Image (cartoon, grey):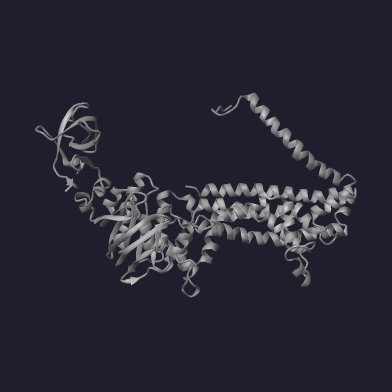
Amino acid sequence: MNRNPVSESRFARAALITIALLFLALFILLPLFAVFSEALKEGFDDFAEAVSTPDALAAIRLTLIVAAISVPLNMVFGVAASWAITKFDFRGKGFLITLIDLPFSVSPVVSGLIFVLLFGANGYLGPWLAEHDVRIIFAVPGIVLATVFITFPFVARELIPLMMEQGKEDEEAAISLGASGWQTFWHVTLPNIRWALLYGVLLCNARAMGEFGAVSVVSGHIRGITNTMPLHVEILYNEYDFVGAFAVASLLAGLALVTLVIKTVLEWRFNLHHAGARH
Amino acid sequence: MISVENIRKQFGGFAALGGVDLQIAKGEFVALLGPSGSGKTTLLRVIAGLEFQDSGVVRFDGEDVSDRPVAERGVGFVFQHYALFRHMKVADNVSFGLSVRKRGERPSARERRERADELLRLVHLEGLGDRYPAQLSGGQRQRVALARALAIQPQLLLLDEPFGALDAKVRKDLRRWLRELHSQMGLTSIFVTHDQEEALELADRVVVLNKGAIEQIGTPEQVYTQPATPFVASFVGENTVLPGGVHVRPHDLEITTDGGHAVVVDNVFRKGGVWRIEGMLQGTDTLVELDLDAAQAAPETGSTIHVRPIRASNFTG
């Protein structure tokens, strides 16, 4: 066996590995197994029935709609913010970077409340919105807003370190050769960041579909109308419909697993790509 | 002709360029030489239009181009780390400047490929057009970067530390080759370097910069043998400062038997055709370097010799 100066004794190594594996088994694998086994406890037919009730289908549809709006928005925002931060020097840059991290440091419930305070019936804009018959809180727009807020750091956080490392020489080379800003972005910047961008979008999507806290505050839990999948799981669970709750939950868990696989593949591709580009 | 007039540039509180004037004639090969922080790269980037001066004027053939962005100045810029587009094949890298042209002026894909192959032939990389940059060596990448810059037929070629990231042997070959290419294509070229040897070997004229100002402009011969300031004397070439502000090159010191400066020898080694003798000026901590014809006997380490300058620059008067 290879000895290297920083390696631990065989016993310490075995102990560390065992602790890590036990921990993972207890906190990740066991719950995951529980979700699927509970969902399928009464057989596949009950599972299929549970996920195809009108309310469940409405929750799935709403979750997909919310993700379909918020993920592209955050993709555009993330790229724009990273581009601004890494390619230009301007005042307040540090402040912008801090702001981008805000949703990570604020409790999701607070994030939801912010929107209730802004758009709710007693909020700043509430009366005006009521007058014009625009519903945001306890409606789909509120859910989208809360989701956008919660997920906006994901893309930018992936891109900023990479773009900082890449610097702006490539872009300068492109413009010195006569490329316009748009051509430079499309032909030079975007290919340089594509894997990190995909990765960020993937994480953003997973969170957008799985967000509970902030969405719960603004949703109002109207069955079939403002319930996303995570909210629907909670409702079913509170009504002692365990098969139904776990069936919908298993869809979310399945999404997490798919995300994990794609993430691993991306990481592998991304590193490969990265390694090839180093000199 | 390139004319730079009273260029000033600040970065925050740091004055990168403090009023620089420079004229460069058509066909010249000019080196901007200086230590890091001397403003040499900033000056190159201001000439290119990648950076804009706070005040002063840049003229190309008498025309004020100060407000023109890099794309409209017709310059080829070669970056220190090549800045090749890693996801594009070498040929696509080279023809990038042609493929981003407006629809009416853009050559067809076949013409672009032909032009790329032609340029790759020029830089001795024939047949490598279908590789990716990552599959090339450092020297090859540098030549791809050069071919790419030449594709837009620039009137002026600007190179930022073009050999900085290469090893010594490749660097030497590339230098000679670049010099040939420059004369063969009738280019006007400006390159930035911190390596005085490189500047002296390649350039028609050397511009020595320090702390955002020009210390001296001259031929390599002038800069080496008649340094205008103590900074130039010590930065360009090896140099010993004797008491009284006398700057002297190692090959301009001779060993005497009568008088001169006493030097305690602490190291002797062969340097090409000469002995390099290193010692301390007696009673001081001034390092003295001197070259002695290898045909003569080298002094012993620890012995005391007496030296006298044959030729020196004096900066006290």
- The image quarter in which residue B262 lies: top left
Q: Is residue B29 left or right of residue B255?
A: right
Q: Nearer the viewer, residue A164 or A216?
A: A216
Q: Is residue A70 left or right of residue B107?
A: right
Q: Residue B29 placed where, x, y %?
A: 29, 59
| Quarter that holds the N terminus of chain B | bottom left
Q: Nearer the viewer, residue A209 or B159?
A: A209
> Is any part of residue B137 visible from this angle?
yes
Asked if A260 appears above or below A65 in the picture, the reply is: above
Q: Residue A133 placed where, x, y %?
A: 79, 71
Q: Residue A172 placed where, x, y %?
A: 46, 60
Q: Residue at x 23, y 56 (%)?
A: B218
Q: Residue A124 placed where, x, y %?
A: 73, 64
**Badge count:** 0
Residue farthest left in this picture? B258
Q: Residue at x 37, y 45 (%)?
A: B167
Asked if B235 appears above or below B286 in the picture, the reply is: below
Q: Nearer the viewer, residue A164 or A193?
A: A164
Asked if A189 appears above or below A107 in the picture, the reply is: below
Q: Nearer the viewer, residue B70 or B95?
A: B70
> Is any part of residue B125 visible from this angle?
no
